Image (tube, helix red, strand yellow):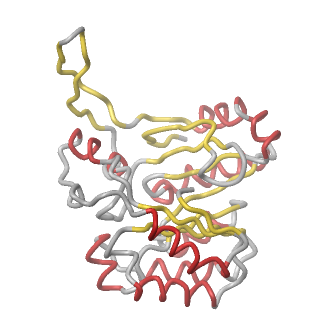
Amino acid sequence: MKAIIFDIRSFSVHDGPGIRTTFFFKSCPLRCAWCHNPESHHPGIQKVTGTYKIGQSSVPCFKQVGEIITLNQAISKAEADRLFYEESGGGITLSGGEPLMQADFVIALLEAAHQLDIHTAVDTSGYAPESVFKEVITKTDLVLFDLKIMEDAQHKKFTGKSNRLILENFKWLMRQKTEVIIRIPLIENITDTMQNLEAIRAVLKSTKAIPRIDLLPYHQTAYNKYKQLDLTYGLKQLPNYPIEKQQQIKTYFNDLAPVVSIGA
């Protein structure tokens, strides 16, 4: 069994508890205006133009974005990092892109990890067919779930898709025993409007106890990725998210979870 990924990040501490190995899967059904991983958009392996320096000169070159990984290779990588998981309470995280776009591989990897007693997490937008979403969730220990924009027309405008399927999957998820961490991207005048924050708060307040909320402030680091991939980046003029606003929004959500973090 094989999948297409665009990165594997060892010693990650921002994708779930402890030290983790994060697998970044290619392909995503959403086109979030602020996406920091545009290399995940295309489902296949790409070749893009880049440069490398020889002395004072820059020489054109081609760079491959994406690679094929087998299930055995993925498990071998997880096992190689296993000592770090055991010492820190970590494990593997499947991210992207949208990992549920390659659900068969994701399910097989989650099952194999559990056979080795390795903790698992899935980072998802929730945009997947109900049957796929449910099958994946029943196989993982932890879900990192993105809540972006609650109003459907605005969600379509800034992500390209309706949020109805996402919210239906989220409602089902909240009735399960699986642990959930909520992730909220903070994009000025898009996700951080009072109307949107109030809507997110209302949904979270009506659900089961949430152990953690991660606020993810916008930053400009993705611009060069868009340029290299020859993609238009509509938010390239938007500055990094203001620190004072980060703190205000943290205070707004503080009573909804034991841990509310910024930039996790």
Residue at the image position 55 percent from the left and 85 percent from the top: 201
The C terminus lies in quadrant: bottom right
Residue 42 horizontal side relative to residue 168, left or right: left
Give the quadrant of residue 204: bottom right
Question: Which quarter of the rendered picture does the N terminus lie within?
Answer: top right
Residue at image coords 53%, 69%: 247
From the viewer's side, name the closer residue of 72 and 24: 24
Asked whether, in this view, residue 40 is left or right of residue 135, the answer is left
Q: Position of residue 206 (x, y in %)?
A: 63, 91
Note whether 136 is above or below 236 in the view shown: below
User: Up-down: is 71 above or below 200?
Assistant: above
Q: Residue at x 66, y 86 (%)?
A: 207
Where residue 46 appears, as percent x and y from the top left, is 28, 37
Residue 246: percent from left, percent from top: 48, 67
For residue 23, side relative to residue 242 (left or right)? right
Residue furthest toward the top?
A: 55
Q: How many marks are shown on the rendered structure?
A: 0
Q: Residue at x 40, y 76 (%)?
A: 192
Q: Where's residue 9, x and y in %?
A: 55, 38
